[in-house]
Image (cartoon, grey):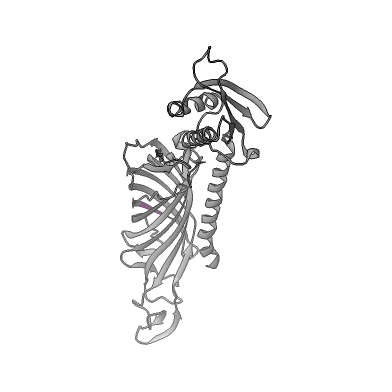
């Protein structure tokens, strides 16, 4: 039993490690867009202005700015001088822009931009910055980004796995069935016997039974709302009460409530109803017609097709369970031994998702993040589609 109790903990740790491995792999696959900004100008006011504004444009549009040049993949460089050729262009200043591949120390883009006042550059800073970087370093899309501490971080996780209309569930089950002995018909409430109930000749004490046999579950889950799913399934498991193998087959209905608070996990508490379809007539003289209970299912992304899951469920059978007395002439009375039946089931498996649910603007699938850009009073609002 101690090993059985450790099983769900082991499974949760394994799923968590697998999810982190996927996350790190996605991060490594994304190209390095880190930029180091440096530059010179005619005066300190110009230099501070352009450094601050180019940093703002980079940060707010998906290009991480680093303070250490060695960490950057690219160097964005500006150099502002007085325009010495006013007869060709009447503007007062000439700004030379360069984009350097920092990994091979090679200039890949260079162009000039003329201006007279910093006020007019308020309308042109983004144009200048994008001219330098957009053709070489494609920006992150909003689905790739999340803002943490005013810095754009790559998220790298596709969340569509948890927003499908239909899931096909394939799971391996390990149900632990508990039969709690009832005193009905037993001497002193615990013993089968020979002779008369009030004057038994010989007795044999009985005990509760705990049985564990493997099984499988196949089901279809429909996610009708972002917070509500319905699942119909077929559950098959082996049974063995007295070296008498048989198959338990049952139909199940689950009402689930998906909780999507975490990006790596979806937690689904649920209520469950189960109706047995087959009962071993060699073992049971009476068997409950249905069981009720509930559980929790924890899912994590398993590629683009669906999700891996761990499921823990408790079910309580409504009514008594009666087994035929197995002792024959040895202890023939009573004819039936009665129990209360309940089950604790651990399941692992995979849910194949089909058809993405459409996301509407303003729905709960949208997360609005407000970003205060460093060294600026401007506020940028990003809407990330989760």
Q: Residue 231 at x, y = what percent? A: 35, 47
Q: Residue 121 at x, y = what percent? A: 46, 27
Looking at the image, can residue 306 be seen?
Answer: no
Residue 210, placed above or below residue 97: below
Q: Residue 238 at x, y = what percent? A: 47, 56
Task: Give the main secondary structure of the magenta stretch.
Answer: strand
Residue 185 is one of the magenta-drawn residues? no
Please report the residue visible at 54 percent of the width from the left and 27 percent of the height from the top: 133
Magenta segment range?
247-251
Residue 336, placed above or below residue 78: below
Question: As rendered, which of 238 and 3 lies closer to the eye?
Answer: 3
Please report the residue visible at 49 percent of the width from the left and 19 percent of the height from the top: 91
Question: As rendered, which of 283 and 359 lies closer to the eye?
Answer: 359
In which image quadrant can residue 163 be found? top left
Which quadrant is the C terminus positioned in? top left
Please report the residue visible at 38 percent of the width from the left and 76 percent of the height from the top: 333
Looking at the rendered structure, the number of numbered marks drawn on it comes to 0
Question: As rendered, which of 121 and 282 lies closer to the eye?
Answer: 121
Q: Residue furthest right?
A: 104
């Amino acid at each position: 039993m101690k090993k059985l109790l450790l099983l769900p903990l082991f499974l949760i740790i394994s799923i968590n490690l697998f999810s982190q491995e996927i996350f790190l792999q996605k991060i490594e696959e994304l190209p390095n867009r880190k930029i180091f900004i440096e530059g010179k100008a005619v005066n300190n006011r110009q230099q501070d202005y352009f450094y601050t504004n180019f940093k703002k444009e980079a940060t707010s549009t998906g290009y991480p700015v680093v303070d250490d040049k060695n960490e950057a993949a690219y160097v964005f460089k500006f150099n502002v001088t007085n325009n010495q050729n006013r007869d060709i262009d009447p503007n007062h200043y000439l700004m030379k822009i360069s984009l350097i591949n920092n990994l091979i120390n090679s200039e890949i883009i260079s162009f000039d931009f003329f201006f007279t006042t910093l006020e007019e550059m308020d309308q042109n800073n983004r144009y200048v910055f994008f001219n330098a970087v957009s053709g070489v370093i494609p920006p992150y899309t909003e689905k790739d980004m999340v803002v943490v501490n005013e810095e754009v971080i790559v998220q790298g996780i596709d969340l569509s796995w948890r927003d499908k209309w239909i899931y096909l569930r394939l799971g391996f089950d390990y149900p632990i069935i508990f039969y709690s002995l009832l005193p009905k018909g037993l001497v002193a409430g615990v013993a089968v016997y020979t002779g008369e109930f009030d004057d038994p000749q010989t007795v044999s004490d009985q005990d509760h039974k705990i049985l564990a046999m493997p099984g499988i579950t196949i089901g279809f889950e429909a996610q009708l709302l972002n917070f509500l799913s319905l699942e119909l399934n077929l559950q098959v498991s082996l049974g063995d009460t007295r070296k008498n193998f048989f198959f338990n087959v049952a139909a199940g209905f689950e009402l689930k409530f998906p909780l999507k608070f975490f990006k790596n996990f979806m937690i689904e508490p649920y209520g469950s109803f189960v109706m047995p379809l087959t009962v071993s007539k060699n073992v049971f003289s009476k068997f409950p017609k249905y069981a009720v209970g509930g559980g929790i299912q924890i899912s994590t992304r398993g590629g683009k097709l669906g999700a891996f899951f761990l499921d823990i469920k408790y079910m309580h059978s409504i009514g008594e369970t009666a087994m035929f007395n197995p002792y024959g002439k040895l202890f023939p009375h009573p004819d039936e031994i009665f129990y209360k039946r309940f089950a604790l089931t651990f399941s692992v498996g995979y849910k194949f998702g089909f058809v993405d649910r459409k996301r509407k603007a303003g729905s709960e699938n949208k997360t609005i993040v407000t970003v205060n850009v460093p060294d600026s009073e401007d506020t940028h609002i990003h809407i990330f589609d989760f």
